[in-house]
Image (tube, coloured by chain):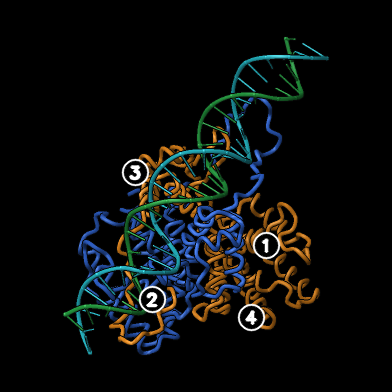
Chain colours: A blue, B orange, C cyan, D green
DNA sequence: GTGGGGAAAACGTCTGACGTTTAGCGTCCG
DNA sequence: CGGACGCTAAACGTCAGACGTTTTCCCCAC
């Protein structure tokens, strides 16, 4: 909310209701298109009319139509290509994009007093052990191999997620549950935590310990030992929390 | 991704990498401003220069600056007001906005084969019992009263979340944990589920049962019986899952 | 057959103008 | 003296038209 006007003279009755008298045209157009996309009337891949035609269709100018498209495109509902055969297309839903957006939003919230890093750590403590259990119960051979690979992958000190195809262990584990929702909830948290921990003074010896934990958990999962996997992951997260609390909190 | 051009003649090598040669100016401006906002250089409430000046500052026209602002505003990073004393202001981070956005994104994903309603139900089964436990451990008198009120609130058949101040029981419970992150993860799931269940044929007798569960859980929380609260919530969610599986899945 | 050079379609950007909203202030009348 | 009315100015909202840029496709020359 924008800054309240400095409480000028007259007592504002209850709450400064700042209603928007009329929604701007670009907003109306964007809302209408969004509704149609969400309702499935415009399936992914559909090519919208070009900007000039779109404007005519809604009775607005091309500039206004363009602003509406910018809104939708920044919400990843459409994307725009240039050149002949270019145009605006309805996007395929993309979980990775959602993870990114949520992570970004969390990054903003975590700077406020409303959301504390300890809240993220608590959520993680709730999520990841359960994920480890599910992964142990469900992972097929290929998934097990991916988890093992992630646990064994060499750690790059400077740039996390450096090599192509090298995913973070925790990310891999969330995906190994086969439940995309768990990834969607857990991954943004991990991303924020990793960002905050970056270049906190953590010694190599401690990273070795972390890697050992990862390998142990991976083995539990490979052998289908759900209970042990869950317990080991809980210990691991608790240990990590200690690290974060020491170095990362107000970094 | 836009529809692949229909595999014309030549075999595309590995993956149709559609790189963006140059990022449009409006995108560069938006990215630059976003960076500054996220870095804290432009605290919430800051008033940006007017559109014309902003354009001059970046060496672009006012239209381009406007498109950049539309991008940021649709991401809830800024908001614009009209009139004298109007302008573009850096937004206060708003958890409710985040919940909305995530819910909307989930609504899209849940239409794909990647994310199934059963995944949401599983995530909920993981989250809410734990939330009930935490609430029982932590809730102060005021919070307990809110939870009781939410459990006792009359159910409006037609419009859920009808009365002002009447929040859904599950929402209230998530907030009662005192951990905003749990609300951020759980609430969008609940929103999507509620949307899908709407006007599925659920009988009044079943709703009565649901309400009874809610009251029981509320009492456990009021009395600080963490284990019982968790267990009761688990049973409740399992029961609800049966409801969803019967009526809501492909509604 | 093959390579290169238009041509065309669509987005990207600019310019300038005018409409619309809203807070604030001055004026006028009671 | 005070309050209501109405004007003004700042900023966003919208429009119209023009031109540049990117990219694909196709035709033509070699």
Q: Are marks 1 and 2 in contact (CB under 8 Å)?
A: no
Circle 3 sits on which residue? B59
Q: Chain of mark 4?
A: B
Position of A65 relative to A95 (above/below) = above
Q: CA distance from mark 1 to mark 2?
A: 32 Å
Q: Disc 2 vs disc 4: which is toward the camera?
A: 4
Q: Disc 4 vs disc 1: which is toward the camera?
A: 4
Give the label on residue A173, or none. Answer: 2
**Secondary structure of residue under mark 1:** helix
**Secondary structure of residue under mark 3:** loop
Q: Is residue A243 visible?
A: no
Q: Position of residue B125 (x, y in %)?
A: 57, 74
Nearer to me, C6 or A141: C6
Circle 1 sits on which residue? B169
Circle 2 residues within 10 Å: few <14, some 14–19, many ≥20: many
- Image quadrant of residue B171? bottom right
Q: Are marks 2 and 4 on the same chain?
A: no
Q: Are marks 2 and 3 on the same chain?
A: no
Q: Is residue A237 left or right of residue B195?
A: left
Nearer to me, A26 or A13: A26
Q: CA distance from mark 2 to mark 3?
A: 46 Å
Give the label on residue A228, or none. Answer: none
**Secondary structure of residue under mark 2:** helix
User: Quick one: label 3 or label 4, which is nearer the N terminus?
Assistant: 3
Q: Are marks 4 and 1 on the same chain?
A: yes
Q: Are marks 3 and 1 in contact (CB under 8 Å)?
A: no
Q: Disc 3 vs disc 1: which is toward the camera?
A: 3
Q: Residue at x 40, y 89 (%)?
A: A140
Q: Are marks 1 and 2 on the same chain?
A: no
Circle 4 residues within 10 Å: few <14, some 14–19, many ≥20: some
Q: CA distance from mark 3 to mark 1?
A: 52 Å
């Amino acid at each position: 909310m924008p800054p309240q006007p400095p409480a000028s003279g007259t007592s504002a009755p209850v709450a400064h209701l700042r209603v928007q008298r009329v929604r701007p045209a670009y907003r109306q157009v964007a809302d209408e298109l969004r509704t149609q996309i969400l309702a499935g009337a415009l399936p992914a891949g559909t090519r919208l009319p070009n900007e000039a035609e779109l404007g005519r269709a809604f009775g607005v100018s091309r500039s206004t139509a363009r602003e509406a498209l910018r809104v939708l495109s920044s919400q990843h509902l459409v994307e725009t290509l240039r050149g002949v055969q270019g145009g605006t297309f309805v996007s395929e839903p993309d979980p990775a994009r959602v993870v990114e957006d949520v992570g970004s939003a969390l990054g903003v919230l975590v700077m406020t007093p409303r959301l504390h890093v300890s809240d993220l750590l608590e959520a993680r403590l709730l999520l990841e052990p359960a994920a480890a259990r599910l992964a142990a119960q469900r992972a097929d051979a290929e998934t097990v191999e991916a988890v093992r690979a992630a646990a064994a992958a060499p750690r790059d000190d400077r740039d996390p997620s450096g090599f192509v195809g090298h995913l973070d262990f925790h990310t891999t584990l969330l995906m190994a549950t086969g439940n995309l929702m768990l990834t969607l909830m857990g991954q943004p948290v991990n991303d924020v935590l990793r960002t905050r921990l970056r270049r906190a003074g953590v010694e190599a010896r401690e990273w070795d310990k972390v890697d050992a934990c990862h390998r142990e958990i991976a083995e539990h999962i490979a052998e289908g030992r759900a209970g042990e996997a869950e317990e080991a992951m809980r210990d691991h997260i608790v240990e990590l929390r200690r690290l974060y609390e020491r170095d990362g909190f107000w970094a």
